[in-house]
Image: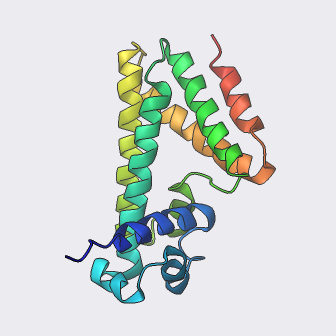
Amino acid sequence: MPRSSDARQRFIETAALLFQQRGYSAVGLNELIEKSQAPKGSFYHHFPGGKEELAKVALTFSGDYVARKTAGWIGDAKTPNEAACALLDSVADWFEGSGWTQGCPITTVALEVTPENPELHATVEEIFESWVEEISAHAERLDTKHPRDWAECLLTQIQGAWIVGRIQKSRAPFNQIKALYRD
């Protein structure tokens, strides 16, 4: 009995990492196939829509990962400020641990392809909305005034810190924002 192939998942995980590090356009299809160590012939079997279809799936995979991590990072918080600080510290730790190479797994692609690519734009929009909903649910649990606005503001601040932190190769932007949330 033949074993089921993990080629599809390898394509997704490889694309997610490469897009996070370098963006959509800087990653060629041949590189994706080579780095995934999956059979070239299976690429179009799994992704008949080509690189764009893979990008949508890889972005969704990354977005779901970040949403799950976010829930874990702030799930035990007792106050909105504690939740914000926990999220900022966790993202900064993750980023620093990557040697400043793994910025937001969605923003790198979002800045490059939206709004010119409507399909990827819609995927990015859905992911950011899911993150706002995740953070907002915790804000509501913590009795935050205007939980959705609070979540959007925090997410915007984190995105800015990720960009500036990558430029500076520093967690200082995260710490500056964290200072705003100290009780």
Position of residue 122 measured from the top left corner of the image (x, y, whole percent): 35, 60
In the image, 161 versus 72, the foreground residue is 72
Is residue 17 positioned above or below 87 on the image? below
Quarter of the figure with residue 135: top left
Position of residue 118 measured from the top left corner of the image (x, y, whole percent): 37, 69
Colour setup of the view: rainbow
Quarter of the figure with residue 59: bottom left
Q: Residue at x 67, y 51 (%)?
A: 98
Describe residue 2's horizontal placement relative to residue 50 as left or right: left
Is residue 102 positioned above or below 29 on the image? above
Position of residue 117 measured from the top left corner of the image (x, y, whole percent): 42, 72
Position of residue 85 measured from the top left corner of the image (x, y, whole percent): 60, 24
Let me know if residue 60 appears in the view. Answer: yes
| Outermost residue to the front | 1
| Outermost residue to the left | 1
Describe residue 84's horizontal placement relative to residue 133 as left or right: right
Q: Residue at x 39, y 12 (%)?
A: 143
Q: Quadrant of the N terminus?
A: bottom left
Q: Residue at x 50, y 29 (%)?
A: 73
Q: Residue at x 44, y 54 (%)?
A: 62
In the image, 154 versus 3, the foreground residue is 3
In the image, 155 versus 9, the foreground residue is 9
Q: Quadrant of the C terminus?
A: top right
In the image, 118 versus 92, the foreground residue is 92
